[in-house]
Image (cartoon, grey):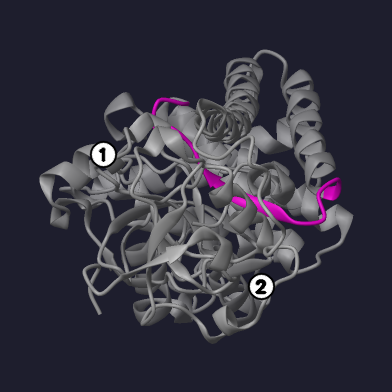
Amino acid sequence: MTDSDTQDIDVGELRVGHFVFLDLSWIRHPFPLSSFKIQSAEQIKTIRSLGLRRIRYSPGRSGPESDVIQPAAMAPTDPCVSETPTAEEMAKSQRRELLSQQRASLQRCERQFDNAANAYRQITKSVHADPQAARVTCEALVGSLLAELRGAQEANIRLLAEKVGDRPSLHAINVTVLALLLGRACCLDDSIMTDIGVGALLHDVGKAELPDRLRFQDQFERASEQQLFQEHVAYGVTMAKRMGLTSGALLAIGQHHEYADGTGYPLRAGNDKLHPASRVVSLINHYDNLCNPVNPILALTPHEALAQIFAKTRAKFDTTLLNAFVRMMGVYPPGSVVQLSDERYALVVSVNSSRPLKPRVVVHDPAIPAEEALIVDLESEPSLAICRSLKPLQLPGAALAYLSPRKRVCYFFEPARSIDDGAIAA
């Protein structure tokens, strides 16, 4: 079935389930895409307000529900808005409102990330001179993140702009955010959640004691360099003791490179010897290092990183925890570049950690400027699905420039309703 296999239909005959094509400029309608399956009577009402008498639809791509008359959809249109500039202005206004909500939601996340990154930098600057003050700042930051999570019945994992944070703070906040989300998904108690947050935030604090040439390395030419690099764990534990951290947070810092199969360092401890907070931080630290290595050439896409962990290294992690992490992130975590069932390309920008199978995406649409693109909620669009994940360099040039996949993947979270208000079905 192609777009040419269409028929005209009077807007008064539209039903839920019709797959329609809006042959209008993108600024004249509020929908993220110009072709989509109608999901609700409200969408029919919006289409009728555009001033069109007939539109194209595809019988082959329409669902069986199109045979069911929807009373609300059959309500007569207001003749005053038909084929008048008011209809176009209404569409522009609705699109502007959706874009405004979408941008405000992203800006809130970026501000929160910046605040967390600034607090982290303050901690690392004061940890030697005033370790107690550093602990207070750290616990206050983790407490505020936990309060945000407790206040949201559901949370979205949100992809942020690449410009936020420097590398040390980006990694620390990424690991902290995802570790807290995973702890929440596993229903861990408050004390362990606090240990997870503090341990995740400070897991690399000992790297400040390393020579500059080794501090941000993940590949070493000599065994002596690697051995020296691994000393950052012991340095971190020493600093954490000076700060007066809890035993759980200390263990999370001391065990963040330990693995369930006993292949980690420094003690090669197995899963039965790892603190619950350590298991969480070790997994998330490993994932973020795959996505954001020191050498960007070696970076895996979030989809590749998750697939590699599950397929090749799952013995390194607690089975229950790893399964919960995969469920939380979804098959295509935020930052994944994908191709949809209609062959268009898209970037995953948000995943609901409670319902991750249908993420929210930005779709490459040459008819719409990238800065004006609305987020498409695949959960509300059953006719559209993800077919495969791609490396950014596999994208055609135009799609690559439009979607601008991040070289550094940066995450934060927000209440699910924030994105739900700003993303609509295609």
Highlighted magenta segment, given as a residue range:
150-164
Q: Main SS type for the magenta part? A: loop
**Which image quadrant: the N terminus?**
bottom left
Establish if 155 lies above or below 403.
Answer: below
Going 58% across and 23% down the picture, which residue do you hit? 114
Q: Is residue 381 above or below residue 209?
A: below
Q: Where is residue 130 in the image (x, y as percent from the top left)?
A: 72, 15
Using the image, tell me which numbered label, if any, was put on residue 273: 2
**113 and 98: which one is in front?**
98
Q: In this view, does 103 lie to the left or right of 275?
A: left
The vertical placement of 60 against 331, above or below, is below
- Left or right: 95, with 148 as reference point: left
Q: Mark 1 points at which residue?
A: 402
Q: What residue type is labelled 2?
A: Lys
Residue that protrudes farthest toward the left in the picture: 397
Q: Was residue 161 drawn as part of the magenta stretch in this picture?
A: yes
Image coordinates for residue 32, horizontal then vertical, percent: 46, 47
Tell me the residue at 84%/41% (across/down).
147
Residue plotted at (63% across, 32% down): 101
Residue 273 coordinates in the image, percent (x, y): 66, 73
Q: Is residue 291 magenta?
A: no
How crowded pointer 1 is (Cα within 10 Å; few <14, some 14-19, many 20+) is rated as many
Viewer-side residue, 114 vs 337: 337
Against 19, is 371 above or below?
Answer: above
Q: Disc 1 marks which amino acid? A: Tyr
Please tell me which residue lies in front, 220 or 74. 74
Q: Could you tell me which secondary element the residue under label 2 belongs to?
A: helix
- Callout 1: SS: helix
Front-lying residue, 197 or 207 = 197
Q: In which quarter of the image is residue 26?
A: top left
